Image (spheres, helix red, strand yellow):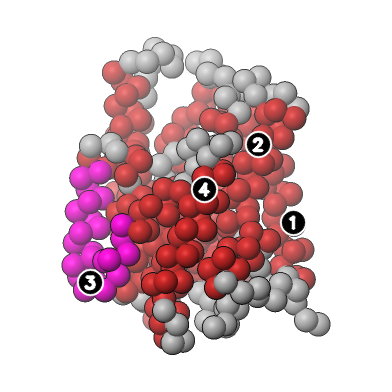
Amino acid sequence: MNPIEGSNRIQTLDYLRGFALLGILLINSVFLLSARTPIPGTMDEHYWKFLYLFIEGRFFTIFSFLFGIGFYLFISRAIAKGNNGYILFLRRLLAMFLFGLIHSMYHPGEALSIYAVFGLLVLPLYKLKKELNLVISLGLLFVFSLVGMKVLLPLPMILLGLTAGQYRVFEQISAKKKKIIWFTMIAFILSVLALVYQNQLLPTQGFQESNSLYWFYYIGLMVGPIVSSFYVGAYVLLVQSSFFQRLFSPLKAYGRMALTNYLMQTVFIMIVGYGLNLSGQIHYLQSLFICLVIYLIQLLYSIIWLRFFHFGPLEWVWRMFTYLEVPPLLKRK
């Protein structure tokens, strides 16, 4: 059993994980710091609009989708190496659930425990034909989006990610470039139409609870997977360029340590909120500046850490739990 991944790591997925973490922090910081309700006509209001048009419901769907792809890759590669991929994956899910259980004490809306439960539900579908999984995932996504059930949306997105793995969407991307361009163009057109419609539902009477505000949130959640699809397609196309690979290389390191960085985001927010006593005291726009500082810290330590170690610290613990052995952490010179 070899718990160290080889050169078959799909780097595009690391770029996407890093990208998804950026958006997740923007939303989580607002809620965990109990940011003050924006005053109409201020920069706070404009930033609030930006968050709910372009961020909320967009990046957690990408993160869920990526978990599904990782789900497929982990089991298929484990089986290819002669290991029992199902047992290994069950231990992996158990470890994730325990991480999430601890995390939920500080972040009630955390995703890890939900992913672990939904991963267990999706596991029996691993052997289904990819065409059937595609129909099931899209059907569930349509229903859950239509009824606005945010807590259930990760389920179809995880299954859709597994299906993308079955179709090998992220393998040999250069050969699929034309198809990805067409997909991204269609997703862009649909996203523009969806966002224009959502923008028309913006409340005009401030931020007090109203029917208009409800529909603005509801439509935002419903069209989230469409906008997420455009983000993924556009970002995947960008990172096929050597220029953007270099430009976004810090995000690749950020994404390789996705578990560590996701949990550490909460730690940093808790330090700001309770250590500095800023919880309930900051405005929406101020949360952005806090996020920028957290980004800088996390990107720097991700880059430096991976120069010396094979895995992020919590990724290493996760692998120990999964394989029941201690993988080497320090890189040899």
Residues at marks 3 and 2, CA–CA distance in whole angstroms? 41 Å
Mark 3 or 1, closer to the camera: 3
Tell me the element at label 4.
Answer: helix
Type of amino acid at the residue the image marks with label 1: Leu
Which label sits on residue 300? 1
Mark found first going from the N terminus, 1 or 2: 2
Mark found first going from the N terminus, 3 or 1: 3
Mark found first going from the N terminus, 4 or 2: 4
Q: Residue at position x 37%, y 58% from top?
A: 119
Q: Mark 4 points at which residue?
A: 100
Type of amino acid at the residue the image marks with label 3: Leu
Mark found first going from the N terminus, 4 or 3: 4
- State yes or no: discs 4 and 3 in contact (Cβ < 8 Å): no
Provide residue 29's location: percent of width, then percent of height: 58, 35
Q: Residue at position x 57%, y 24% from top?
A: 34
Tell me the element at label 1.
Answer: helix
Q: Name the residue under label 3.
A: 128
Taking depth in this image into account, of 56 and 74 the one nearest to the observer is: 74
- When asked about the image quadrant of residue 79, the answer is bottom left
Considering the whole magenta stretch, tell me its main secondary structure: helix
Type of amino acid at the residue the image marks with label 2: Ile
**10 Å neighbourhood of mark 3: few (<14), some, or many (≥20)?**
few
Residues at marks 4 and 2, CA–CA distance in whole angstroms? 17 Å
